[in-house]
Structures are given as structure tokens and as C-alpha cells.
Image (tube, rainbow, N blue to C red):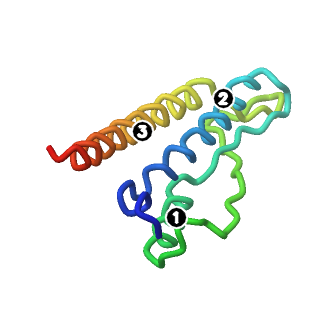
Amino acid sequence: MGPFDKAFGVHPYSMALRLERAEIIASNLANVDTPGFKARDLDYQSVMQDVQSSMNHNDGGVVTAEHPLMYRIPYQPSADGNSVELNVEQAKFAQNNMDFQTSMTFMNMKINGIYSAIKGK
């Protein structure tokens, strides 16, 4: 585990995963009217547990397990087989964005703290 991993913890991995998840959800939103399209997502908590476990075992935070995309089960199945629900995807996208911003704020605080330590403040 390098000094940056110790300083920043899981936040760089979390941010990268949040970006990937934003792309997946955006794809779902883009296909809201595509007949037969199946909404997908990844299990963020499961992936981050593996990252945390990997970091705790000094593996550098590398996740070796595959985490396939999962299909979202719709609350209201549509007649054309599309499982994208606009309101659900919009809520997931907004929550993912807020979580990304939280990690970004934390990273900025860490960077500012490191900068202050280097400057001797």
C-alpha cells in the first residue's frame, strides 16, 4: 500500500466506481423508450467491500473478483419488455451524483490537509 492509498483510503476507488455507475445509469436513461431494453446497475456496496478488504490485506486496493452488471427488476413491468423506469433511474442518478460530490469534497479536504502539512502550517 502506497502513501497515497494511506492518505486517501477508498475515496479514489469510490469516485472511479461512481463515474462508471453514472455511465451505466445514463445508458439506462438513454434507452427508456427502447423496446426490450433491460435496465442494469452494479452493486456499489459489494464492489467497495471488496476494495476495502483488499486494502486491509495490503493488496493496494485492487479488486480481483468480477462484479457483473445486474439487471434491475422493475416495479411496473412494461408491455414492450423495457425495464427502465424513468423516475427510478433519475433518483439513482441523482443519489450517485450526490455521493460522488461527497467523496470529491472529502478528497479536497484531504489534499488541502496534506498541502498544509507540506507548507508547515
Q: Amino acid at mark 2?
A: Ala
Residue at 72% x, 57% y is 68
Find numbered disc 1 in the image and state the secondary structure of the residue it sits on.
Answer: helix
Which marked residue is nearer to the observer: mark 2 or mark 1? 1
Counting residues from the start of the chain, the first of labels 3 and 2 encountered is 2
Foreground residue among 76 and 61: 61
> Residue 77's spot in the image, x, y percent?
71, 35
Residue lying at the far bottom of the rendered structure: 57
Residue at 66% x, 69% y is 65
Disc 1 designates what residue?
A: 51
Task: Identify the mark at residue 99; answer none if there is no mark.
Answer: 3
Q: Quick check: marks 2 and 1 in contact, CB under 8 Å?
A: no
Task: State the separation of the CA atoms marked 3 and 2.
Answer: 16 Å
Find numbered disc 3 in the image and state the secondary structure of the residue it sits on.
Answer: helix
Find numbered disc 2 in the image and state the secondary structure of the residue it sits on.
Answer: helix
Residue lying at the far front of the rendered structure: 119
Q: Is residue 114 left or right of residue 57?
A: left
Counting residues from the start of the chain, the first of labels 2 and 1 encountered is 2
> Residue 15's spot in the image, x, y percent?
50, 44
Q: Is residue 69 left or right of residue 15?
A: right
Q: Quick check: marks 3 and 1 in contact, CB under 8 Å?
A: no
Task: State the separation of the CA atoms marked 3 and 1.
Answer: 17 Å
Q: Amino acid at mark 3?
A: Asp
Task: Identify the mark at residue 26; answer none if there is no mark.
Answer: 2
Q: Is residue 17 left or right of residue 38?
A: left
- Against 7, residue 106 (above or below) is above
Write down the quadrant of residue 99 in the picture.
Answer: top left
Write down the quadrant of residue 33 in the picture.
Answer: top right
Task: State the separation of the CA atoms marked 2 and 1.
Answer: 24 Å
Q: Alpha-carbon neighbours of circle 1 within 10 Å: few (<14), some, or many (≥20)?
A: many
The C terminus appears in which quarter of the rendering?
A: top left
Residue at 83% x, 28% y is 80
